[in-house]
């Protein structure tokens, strides 16, 4: 899978991280896009970390953290980054196509159907129930990431400041991120020295 002069990445556990072929990259993200209804992140983690082994838990958590601050959907950003990491611009395009192809078709079909039943009370109740399920999936993924992450006081402090700024003080997310990212980078740089 790797070029003769290129060593495969190694995880912190000492196992070799497989480099996916282009077809496997497309198929992996196609699976995530096909099966990830209501919350793709839990499925993305399972496919990328547990099933395919393309990322470690730590690498997944770090990439998700970076994707959170980039514009656009987190899982789409993740697909582009992973695709580009393994196969450059073509890999990014393959992963992006895989993650978006089925959901785009399904959303167009659902939108057409929903337009015909939107006035029904049962349709509004179904949307509310789906929203609650999606929130549960997000919380479940956050807990799994927290369990497998190593916490240090500076990361807990940054997370707390972000929570207080956005959830309690109701400051705009953009400004909270714009201030906290340089602070977090400085703290990590200082800790590395």
Image: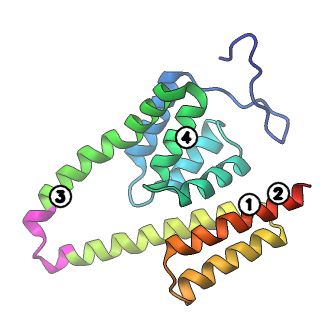
Residue 149's disc is: none
The answer to whether 50 is drawn above or below residue 173 in the figure is: above
Residue span colored magenta: 114-123
Sequence-first tag of 4 and 1: 4
Q: Please, what secondary structure does the residue beneath circle 3 have?
A: helix
Of residue 67 and residue 133, the one placed in the foreground of this image is: 67
Q: CA distance from mark 3 to mark 4?
A: 29 Å
* Residues at marks 1 and 3 touching, judged by CB atoms closer than 8 Å: no
Residue 85 occupies quadrant: top right
Q: Nearer the viewer, mark 1 or mark 3?
A: 1
User: Who comes first in sequence, dot 4 or dot 2?
Assistant: 4
Q: Position of residue 28 (x, y in %)?
A: 49, 35
Residue tagged 2: 189
- Of tags 3 and 2, the one toward the viewer is 2
In depth, the one of 75 and 118 nearer the eye is 75
The structure residue drawn at horizontal position 7% and vertical position 64%, both measured from the top left corner, is: 116
Mark 2, secondary structure of its residue: helix
According to the picture, the residue beneath numbered tag 4 turns out to be 81
Q: Earlier in the sequence, mark 1 or mark 3?
A: 3
Q: Position of residue 177 (x, y in %)?
A: 58, 69
Badge 4 element? helix
State the residue position of label 3. Answer: 111
**In front: label 3 or label 4:** 4
């Amino acid at each position: 899978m790797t070029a003769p002069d290129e060593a495969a990445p190694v995880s912190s556990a000492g196992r070799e991280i497989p480099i996916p072929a282009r077809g496997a990259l497309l198929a992996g993200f196609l699976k995530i896009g096909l099966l990830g209804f209501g919350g793709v992140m839990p499925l993305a983690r399972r496919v990328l970390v547990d099933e395919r082994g393309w990322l470690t838990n730590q690498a997944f958590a770090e990439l998700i953290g970076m994707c959170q601050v980039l514009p656009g959907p987190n899982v789409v950003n993740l697909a582009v980054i992973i695709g580009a990491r393994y196969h450059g611009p073509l890999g990014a395009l393959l992963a992006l196509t895989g993650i978006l192809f089925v959901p785009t078709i399904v959303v167009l079909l659902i939108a057409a159907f929903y337009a015909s039943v939107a006035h029904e009370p049962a349709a509004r109740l179904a949307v509310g129930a789906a929203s609650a399920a999606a929130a549960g999936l997000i919380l479940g993924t956050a807990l799994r990431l927290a369990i497998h992450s190593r916490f240090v006081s500076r990361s807990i402090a940054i997370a707390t400041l972000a929570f207080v700024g956005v959830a309690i003080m109701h400051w705009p997310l953009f400004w909270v991120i714009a201030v906290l990212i340089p602070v977090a980078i400085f703290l990590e740089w200082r800790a590395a020295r």
